[in-house]
Amino acid sequence: NNTPKEKDEVTVRTPVNIAVIKYWGKRDEKLNLPLHSSLSVNLSMDSMYTETSARKSKDTVFCINGKIEVPTKRFDRLINKIRADHPESNVDITTHNTFPTAAGLASSASGYAALACALKLLYPTSGNVSELARLGSGSACRSTAGGFVLWEKGVEEGGKDSVSRQLYSEDHWPELRILVCVVCKDEKAVPSTAGMQSTVQTSSLMKHRVLHVQQRIEQITEAIRLRDFPKFGEITMRDSNEMHAVCLDTYPPIAYLNDTSHQIIRSVHEYNSEKGEVRAAYTFDAGPNAVLFCEEKDLFEIRDRIKSKFCGEGGRVSELVECKIGCGP
Ligand code: 2P0
């Protein structure tokens, strides 16, 4: 009998994932089915992760970062999917993030991934854990694995094939480093879900993006396979720029980047042109915080440059977090 044994209590940790090919736009809002595939680098869990403990109980209780919260509609989608196989299931959940929630650092991604992993362990069901995580938040499906993770958009209506899979493990490119530059810890002005909806309805540039994202995924996958940093970095920056261009093409426009973000972008391009090749790359999610990629050999120089330009007294970058690529839950 291969059925995993049900447990009564579990604790899981899931990584933050940073998309290098961004998810922006859905074809199905209830199931979080995307218009195109996306690809992420998942961070090591030494400094940033979500930890979730769940145990079977009489009632469902949800405690996030020390506060009891009313379960969200998204949470209900996950638990209802579990209840299709386990009708009486109720859980007592305690979850916390080790990074600022809703600061454009994909807290919903690691959060719903942790919830999906915990529920799956408590109540084994058929189907992929990334499919369950996706119901909570699209990008969460990418946090159910480690290393380089592809979320395939899938073609089926019910979303069974809109799941993530690891392309390469964290050991494939151990020299890769990630530097998270925290520019702003406030909640984002336009939540991703509403932003995407507005983009899909109003942006003509989005139609162009959908046509060529797949080709970009193939190119970056090849760059990752070859550990070709200049190629990887260029594609990463171009895709971030395109996502933010699509946001600006939305009507009314959505501007997630601020002056500091633009200064960081300039500074990275200056650095690369001094070196004569791409040695640093930036990417931005739905907020002004920059995530930089480089290889270990260039990390000190790049970090010092960011520190001297953007940190210190009156600095516009309040925190710098260094990470490696990491494993899955
Ligand atoms: C990403 N983002 O690929 C992109 C880049 C933000 C910018 O995935 O509506 O919170 O819950 O499916 O997953 C943020 O979107 O949106 C996101 P929902 P989600 O990481």
Image: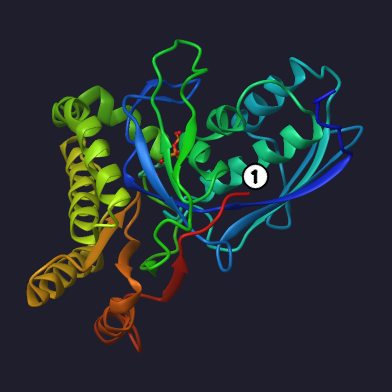
| Residue 142 screen position, x and y as percent | 48, 41
Task: Say which element carries label 1.
Answer: helix
Q: Locate the N terminus and report the quarter of the image it occupies.
A: top right
Name which quarter of the figure residue 71 lies in: top right
Left or right of residue 259, residue 2 in this image? right
Establish if 10 lies above or below 269: above
| Residue 193 screen position, x and y as percent | 41, 34
Taking depth in this image into account, of 316 and 328 the one nearest to the observer is 328
Name which quarter of the figure residue 320 lies in: bottom left
The answer to whether residue 255 shows anywhere in this view is: no
Colouring chosen for the image of the structure: rainbow
Please report the residue visible at 40 percent of the width from the left and 20 percent of the height from the top.
154
Name the kind of residue labelled 1 in the image: Ala
Please report the residue visible at 18 percent of the width from the left and 60 percent of the height from the top.
230
Crowdedness near tag 1: few (<14), some (14–19) or many (≥20) residues, C-alpha within 10 Å = many
Please report the residue visible at 50 percent of the width from the left and 21 percent of the height from the top.
31
Residue picked out by circle 1: 114
